[in-house]
Amino acid sequence: MKKIVGNSLDYIGLHTNSQLNWNTPVPELICRTMDAKQGFLTDTGALACDTGRFTGRSPKDKFIVMDDLTEDSIWWGDVNQPFKASAFERLHQKMILYLSSKEIYVQDVYACAAISYRLNIRAVTEYAWQALFVHNLFIMPEPKELAEFKEDWLILSAPGFFADPATDETRSANFTIINFSRKIILIGGTAYAGEIKKSVFTVLNFLLPRRQVLPMHCSANTSAQGDTALFFGLSGTGKTTLSADPSRKLVGDDEHGWDDTQIFNMEGGCYAKCANLSQEKEPQIFNAIQYGALLENTCFHPGTRRVNYEDISETENTRAAYPLDFMDNIQASAVATIPRNIFFLSADAFGVLPPIAKLTQEQAMYHFLSGYTAKIAGTEMGVTEPRTTFSACFGKPFLPLHPMHYALLLGEKLRNNPIQVWLINTGWTGGSYGTGTRIPLEYTRAMITTTLNGNLQRVSFTRDTFFGLQIPDSCRGVPSAILNPQNTWKDPDQYRITARKLIQQFMQNFSQYMDLATPEICNGGPIVEKSI
């Protein structure tokens, strides 16, 4: 940790000639954003901002510095692109010089609710509303802790600073660069605040496995009796929605760690997608968007300050960033017991996977490595075609280590604890997208509730023909007819053709892990003879 004297950034070479705003209170950050004409208050009091050109992450412009610490440990490739240490130092100094002439904002925050793994982060941002984002998304120290705060990691975020690819060795003018040796993250040329959040997650995905802690891209909730559940899933599968259960306490909506005795939230807030958000369907999230919350790239109803969540003309990736305690029913400590149930969520647009299925440990590791969902391609002349998406460990863009590290850690924890893993299809049934129908949210909620109550363990199961999954024959609150997808298709032959097509894509994706996969993991895959 670096020691500083007073509220100064001289120790990093940032000798600002302008005002330095240190741990600025939320009301002042909001006022300064509005004074700079960078945001507006909505009718609920939330601050609405526009992130500009970038309304999402730019993974092709994310780099990790290659040096003695990282050269032999990072999973280099498309996800983790190497960056020269010398180029990093030059770019770092250019950013310091740029920020020295700006009015800047500093936020001191923690990552990881479990004190044993706590990471002290100092975020230096160019915009006041980015400081608000950091305040909302991470864990705020107590006033007495701020007085003695010493950072482990430094983040410099300057949306107005643009790299010159020809001289700075970046791909484009925007960039995110992580230096594990220097413990510095540089973010420039983009105002999308999610880059800050996910850079810290990437850092923790590197650090925690060294301490036998599994970092997870998942949401979590728990009951009054301490029955914890985890929800893994890619964007659009229902991870945030399904974990926001009024009958259970929310531990966190996106990032958690799991050691030998507990799971813990890495953050202090939520970053919820809010496209088509409504009070009726997601009341906890809707009501959390109040004064102090930050909205990104949303639109208003004409002539009002009322947000039109159905208007995604700016981007489908509209977001709301708010502290965890803005929600009614939370686990205040953000720490919970080891899970009893784990749910892998997949929006299967092919209509092949069952709405719910029980997985063996081998199948759990296989599907964890696969991280499958299906997205809907654009419609042209009334024709649509689902496309598969595989993201290792349900978070491939944030994995600095090879995915097998995380899969083996999961397997170890499953062997050492009485945990049941379930595969949940929040997508289609009775046919693929365009032919079948979306599985109703009320049915998915009923299946999860029945599982958490322990009632699903009391029913009989049928083995799926193609993936070898165990499908319940009945589930309270759900029509038995939809539980086995083979029975919902009007054309059984078309179901078999589609199932084989999906299996082939699973196998093709998994081939990249075959050299390192254990026989145990390989045995958890689809039934190969059914795919030919």
Image: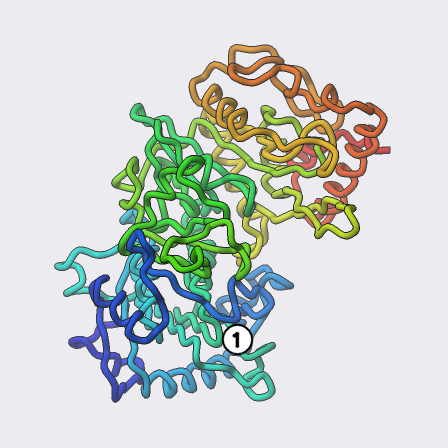
| Residue 147 visible in the snapshot | yes
State which quadrant residue 367 falls in. top right
Task: Give the residue at mark 1.
Answer: 174
State which quadrant residue 14 falls in. bottom left
Looking at this view, is 74 or 527 the one in front? 527
Q: Residue at the spot x=83%, y=32% of the render?
A: 497
Q: Residue at the spot x=30%, y=47% of the render?
A: 113
Q: Residue at the spot x=48%, y=46% of the render?
A: 217
Give the class, few, some or many, for how many residues have Cα within 10 Å of label 1's Cα (few <14, many ≥20): many
- At mark 1, the secondary structure is loop
Residue 443: image x %, image y %? 54, 24
Q: Quadrant of the N terminus?
A: bottom left
Locate residue 513 relative to residue 255 in the image: left or right.
right
Residue 318: image x %, image y %? 48, 55
Locate residue 363 relative to residue 417 in the image: left or right.
right
Mark 1 belongs to which amino acid? Asn
Q: Is residue 408 above or below residue 414?
A: below
Q: In this view, does 36 lie above or below 464?
A: below
> Which residue lies most toward the left here?
144
Q: Residue at the spot x=55%, y=47% of the render?
A: 235
Looking at this view, is 221 or 87 the one in front? 221
Residue 366: image x %, image y %? 63, 37
